[in-house]
Image: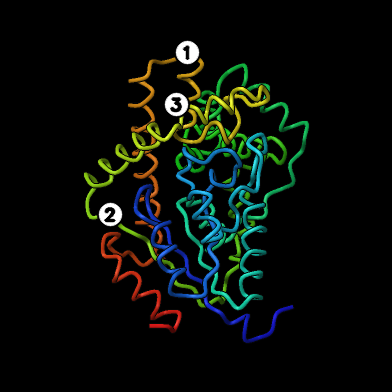
């Protein structure tokens, strides 16, 4: 148990759309503050998925260690519940070392779980999960999403049709309990694990959509030049990974995997990956716009963002 003084160390969270400069800002802050960077990214958790996740280089990770990076093998599924446990442990570790926890990333469902809490869902029943998986293999996930829209239109509206993990979980809840996910969550309201904390949540906001579109395309082309396709080839060569895994379905990896399987040409792969990344950035912006606890700041006004965080922590 850490002392009361350490427990009062504030928490800083930095979120933003893809290619908004979150990681670079975190490393600049690490030069000025005693912080522990905690990644909030659902792809950086995987080992051997470096280029496509825009993971900092080995050298940068040595200089600026990130918790919750490279903690899973790509064959593993990683739940929001597990993220919360890992993130809270990383926060406690940072505070025990007298460092300010700095949560940085773009996986909004992870941030939502920490800042707003998770509903207490019923435990997974293996037989129900297997039945849903087998049905999805026969019918496809778009058909499963259509089923969800029939039984729980509210959940279907917020879960993307290409998100098998969340579609499957919602269907599992309904089939195991007879109640929709939305009804279950209404009966079991979430409680934030960070309630009562002194926390600053900064949303980095690009100055224009055109800037984001240009940055996304430039970043993906840079990934290709760095050897992204070779990285995906190495993953395919393992032999135990497949296109249905959450890791392989990540934006960019999904399109590259299909290209290497002969399902598209190079130009189509590139266009689809860039489009999917732009759509992800749009969903991230939409979520942040609706999240009132986040303080929006210009992503290009780096000095102003730094001052705001330094002032909050008490070092300004």
Q: Position of residue 240 (x, y in %)?
A: 68, 25
Image marks 1 and 3: residues in contact by CB distance under 8 Å: no
Residue 143 image offset from top left, x and y in percent: 53, 23
Q: Residues within 10 Å of mark 3 (few under 14, many from 20)?
A: many
Q: Name the residue that disc number 2 marks.
A: 206
In this rendering, the count of numbered labels is 3
Instruction: Report the residue that reaches farthest toward the front.
Output: 59
Q: Are marks 2 and 3 in contact (CB under 8 Å)?
A: no
Where residue 304 is drawn, which disc sits there?
Answer: none
Which part of the image, by quadrant, shows the N terminus?
bottom right
Vertical order, 315 against 228 (above or below)? below
CA gap, disc 1 to disc 3? 11 Å
* Residue 255: assigned label: 3
Find residue 39 and report its horizontal and vertical position in percent.
Answer: 53, 56
Work out whether mark 2 precedes mark 3 in sequence or the reverse, and give the earlier one.
2
Residues 299 and 285: in front is 299
Query: Closest to the observer: 219 or 80?
Result: 219
Residue 160 vs 31, above or below: the answer is above
Q: Which of 121 and 265 lies nearest the eye of the viewer?
A: 265
- Tell me the colour scheme of the image: rainbow
Q: Residue under label 1, please give it.
A: 262
Mark 2 touches mark 1? (CB < 8 Å): no
Q: Please give the name of the residue rendered at 58% of the width and 61% of the height, measured from the top-left corner.
A: 117
Rate crowding at label 1 as few (under 14), some (14 to 19) or many (20 or more) other CA atoms within 10 Å.
few
Closest to the observer, 270 or 161: 270
Q: In the rendered view, does 300 fall on the left or right side of 189?
A: left
Element marked by disc 2: loop
Residue 242 in the figure: left or right of residue 107: right
**Residue at image location 62% in from the left, 20% down from the top:** 137
């Amino acid at each position: 148990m850490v002392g009361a003084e350490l427990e009062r160390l504030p928490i800083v969270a930095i979120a933003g759309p893809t290619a908004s400069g979150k990681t670079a800002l975190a490393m600049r802050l690490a030069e000025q503050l005693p912080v522990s960077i905690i990644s909030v990214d659902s792809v950086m958790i995987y080992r051997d998925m470096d280029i496509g996740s825009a993971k900092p280089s080995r050298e940068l990770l040595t200089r600026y260690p990130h918790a919750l990076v490279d903690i899973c093998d790509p064959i593993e599924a990683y739940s929001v519940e597990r993220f919360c446990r890992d993130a809270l442990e990383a926060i406690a570790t940072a505070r025990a070392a007298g460092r300010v926890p700095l949560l940085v990333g773009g996986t909004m469902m992870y941030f939502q779980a920490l800042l707003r809490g998770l509903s207490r869902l019923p435990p997974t029943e293996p037989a129900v999960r297997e039945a849903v998986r087998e049905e999805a293999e026969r019918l496809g996930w778009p058909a499963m999403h259509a089923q969800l829209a029939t039984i729980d239109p509210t959940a279907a509206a917020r879960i993307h049709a290409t998100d098998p993990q969340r579609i499957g979980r919602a269907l599992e809840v309904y089939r195991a309990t007879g109640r929709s996910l939305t009804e279950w969550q209404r009966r079991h309201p979430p409680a934030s694990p960070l309630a009562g904390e002194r926390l600053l949540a900064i949303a980095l906001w690009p100055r224009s959509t055109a800037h984001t579109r240009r940055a996304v395309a430039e970043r993906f082309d840079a990934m290709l030049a760095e050897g992204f396709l070779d990285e995906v080839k190495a993953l395919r060569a393992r032999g135990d990974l497949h296109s249905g895994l959450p890791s392989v379905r990540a934006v960019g990896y999904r399109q590259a995997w299909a290209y290497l399987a002969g399902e598209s040409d190079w130009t189509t792969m590139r266009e689809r990956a860039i489009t999917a990344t732009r759509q992800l950035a749009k969903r991230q912006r939409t979520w942040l716009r609706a999240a009132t606890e986040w303080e929006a700041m210009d992503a290009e006004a780096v000095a102003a963002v730094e001052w705001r965080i330094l002032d909050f922590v008490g070092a300004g």
